[in-house]
């Protein structure tokens, strides 16, 4: 089926019925064959060189493209010329470009033609000119050194340490005995115009049933959990540093690749320019490739800024935003740790701080329930007053003693006991809930780790090697034979190679991010030891456990 200039099929008139009179012929109506012939001639005039080489000059028309719509399709073919319909619309960016005007090819050393070609081809914007990135230190740094810096300078850890100290103080306060009350007491003053009873008193509440010990034990779990939260904050800071570190080395590698690709693209462009200068290629063909040169240079600028941003983000993760980051030790294609999902899940369910906090919360809920149950046991209030009786002479010393306790008749703390039982049940259920959430996160991270690892090791290298061979073959065949190979095939091969290289770098980054995510779930101090046996991290005891406690919370 023939196609018109807009890509749609020509509208062929329905055959006339046998009893219909023939349609009169007019000059305004052209047959599809005639119209298609005009389009072909226009294309040949605007895109091909003639035998004398005069076709290097492109024909530019001013009429905009007319698209075939339902309304225009119902009209007879004709109107503006086919070349006008094929012209770039004037309202598009770049449509005002002047046509190529180059003297016809006579000899390769024609100075007038060479000067015209240089004016066309050698106007490339420089890569330099972007704002400079952050200052660079001369000292190379590895991931371990960066993590040590973060542990010493991150405000996140200072906040977590202050919160732990806050909980320690609250735990101490919860177990302190109530202070006695000491005061002056005067009774029956001015009786028989005397001073009455003059003296002092002391009052003390005696806490029964071990309530203070249980209150301290319950508050101590909060303190232990704050220590575990400090450990979790250390892991979070380490994870932020690791993510920024691998982002930086991937950005550095992408900058290197983009710079190499820009140089490679420009070399191909220069080669094509030499072919055009020698009359072996059309003048417009190098311009097609220069588009890719400009895109490659823009990609270098983008990669430079991405690398600068990654270094700034790394400095911020260290808690030292003004610190110059030197050369980073490591490459994104260095070997990654071998990780087993089964071993990783076992380790995670043993050491993860979220599970430690959940288990500690069960102990805390048990102690709070026990405290709620013994709360109705009344405390004893004692009162002793020592006075001198001045109502007679010479007077005498007297002592008043009171001992009392509230009777739990109306309030037996029933509501608080029910609430504490519900809190204990909720705390118990939080353990499997936390385990399920962590296992789901590990499954996602491990799937990304394994798939990206396989892509990087098994698939992408073969694709890159095959595409390099393909590009070389296509370009050599285009240069030496020229038959059956179009210049656009060279474009496609080169851009496919560039795409594969960028995919390779992105896969390396995704691979390491998955490793960082797994290390966060396993909460290891050294990311390169993943897959090994990890000791459970310990946190020093800063507050002695309460005496007689049956269930001790885990420190970390």
Image: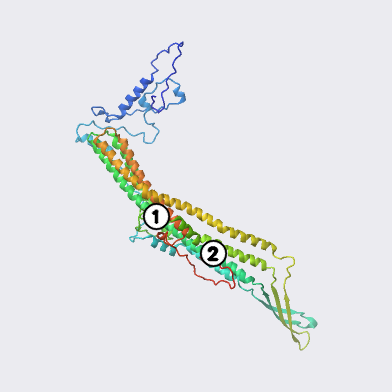
Seen at 69% across and 61% down, the residue is 415
For residue 429, say whether it is visible: yes
For residue 115, say whether it is visible: no
Q: Could you say where residue 273 lies in the image, as x and y percent from the top left?
A: 26, 38
Q: Could you say where residue 440 lies in the image, as x and y percent from the top left?
A: 50, 53
Q: Label 2's element? A: helix
The one nearer the camera, 145 or 398, is: 145
Q: Quadrant of residue 277?
A: top left
Most distant residue in the front direction: 342
In this figure, which residue is indicated by the disc labeled 1?
246
Q: Is residue 538 above or below residue 23?
A: below
Marking on residue 37: none
Q: Is residue 450 above or below residue 401?
A: above
Q: Residues within 10 Å of mark 1 (few under 14, many from 20)?
A: many
- The numbered mark, 2 or 1, whose residue comes first in the sequence reads 2
Q: Is residue 529 above or below residue 77?
A: below
In this figure, which residue is indicated by the disc labeled 2?
225
Q: Could you say where residue 339 lies in the image, as x and y percent from the top left?
A: 42, 56
The one nearer the camera, 73 or 324, is: 73
């Amino acid at each position: 089926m023939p196609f018109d200039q807009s890509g749609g099929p020509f509208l062929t008139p329905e055959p006339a019925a046998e009893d219909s009179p023939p349609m009169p012929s007019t000059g305004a109506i052209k047959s599809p064959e005639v119209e298609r012939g005009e389009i072909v001639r226009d294309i040949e005039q605007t895109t091909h060189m003639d035998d004398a080489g005069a076709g290097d000059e492109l024909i530019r028309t001013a009429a905009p493209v007319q698209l075939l719509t339902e309304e225009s399709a119902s009209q007879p073919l004709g109107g503006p010329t086919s070349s006008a319909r094929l012209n770039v619309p004037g309202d598009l960016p770049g449509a005002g470009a002047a046509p190529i005007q180059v003297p016809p090819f006579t000899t390769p050393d024609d100075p007038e033609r060479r000067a015209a070609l240089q004016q066309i081809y050698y106007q490339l914007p420089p890569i330099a000119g972007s704002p400079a990135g952050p200052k660079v230190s001369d000292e190379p740094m590895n991931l371990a050194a960066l993590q040590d810096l973060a542990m010493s300078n991150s405000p996140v850890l200072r906040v977590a340490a202050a919160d732990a100290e806050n909980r320690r103080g609250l735990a101490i306060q919860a177990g302190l005995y109530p202070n006695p009350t000491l005061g002056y007491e005067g009774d029956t003053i001015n009786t028989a115009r005397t001073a009455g009873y003059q003296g002092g008193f002391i009052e003390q509440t005696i806490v029964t049933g071990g309530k203070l010990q249980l209150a301290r034990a319950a508050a101590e779990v909060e303190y232990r959990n704050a220590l575990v939260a400090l450990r979790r904050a250390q892991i979070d800071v380490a994870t932020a540093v690791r993510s920024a570190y691998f982002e930086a080395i991937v950005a550095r590698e992408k900058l290197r690749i983009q710079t190499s690709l820009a140089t490679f693209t420009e070399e191909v462009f220069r080669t094509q320019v030499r072919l055009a200068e020698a009359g072996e290629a059309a003048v417009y063909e190098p311009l097609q490739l220069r588009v890719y040169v400009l895109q490659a240079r823009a990609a270098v600028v983008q990669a430079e800024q991405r690398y600068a941003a990654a270094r700034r983000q790394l400095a911020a993760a260290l808690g030292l935003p003004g610190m110059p980051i030197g050369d980073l030790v490591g490459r994104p294609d260095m070997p990654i740790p071998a990780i087993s999902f089964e071993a990783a899940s076992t380790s995670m369910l043993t050491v993860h701080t979220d599970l430690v906090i959940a288990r500690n919360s069960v102990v805390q809920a048990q102690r709070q329930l026990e405290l709620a149950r013994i709360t109705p046991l009344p405390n004893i209030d004692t009162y002793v007053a020592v006075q001198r009786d001045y109502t007679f002479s010479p007077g005498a010393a007297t002592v008043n003693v009171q001992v009392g306790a509230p009777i739990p008749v109306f309030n037996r703390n029933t509501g608080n006991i029910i609430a504490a039982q519900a809190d204990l049940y909720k705390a118990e259920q939080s353990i499997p809930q936390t385990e399920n959430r962590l296992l789901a996160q590990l499954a996602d991270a491990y799937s990304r780790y394994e798939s990206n690892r396989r892509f990087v090791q098994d698939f992408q290298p073969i694709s890159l090697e095959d595409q390099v061979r393909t590009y070389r073959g296509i370009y050599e065949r285009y240069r030496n034979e020229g038959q059956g190979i179009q210049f656009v095939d060279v474009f496609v091969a080169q851009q496919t190679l560039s795409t594969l290289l960028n995919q390779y770098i992105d896969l390396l980054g995704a691979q390491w991010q998955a490793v960082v995510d797994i290390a966060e779930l396993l909460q290891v101090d050294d990311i390169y030891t993943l897959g090994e046996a990890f000791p459970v991290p310990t946190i020093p005891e800063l507050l002695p456990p309460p005496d007689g406690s049956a269930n001790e919370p885990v420190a970390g």
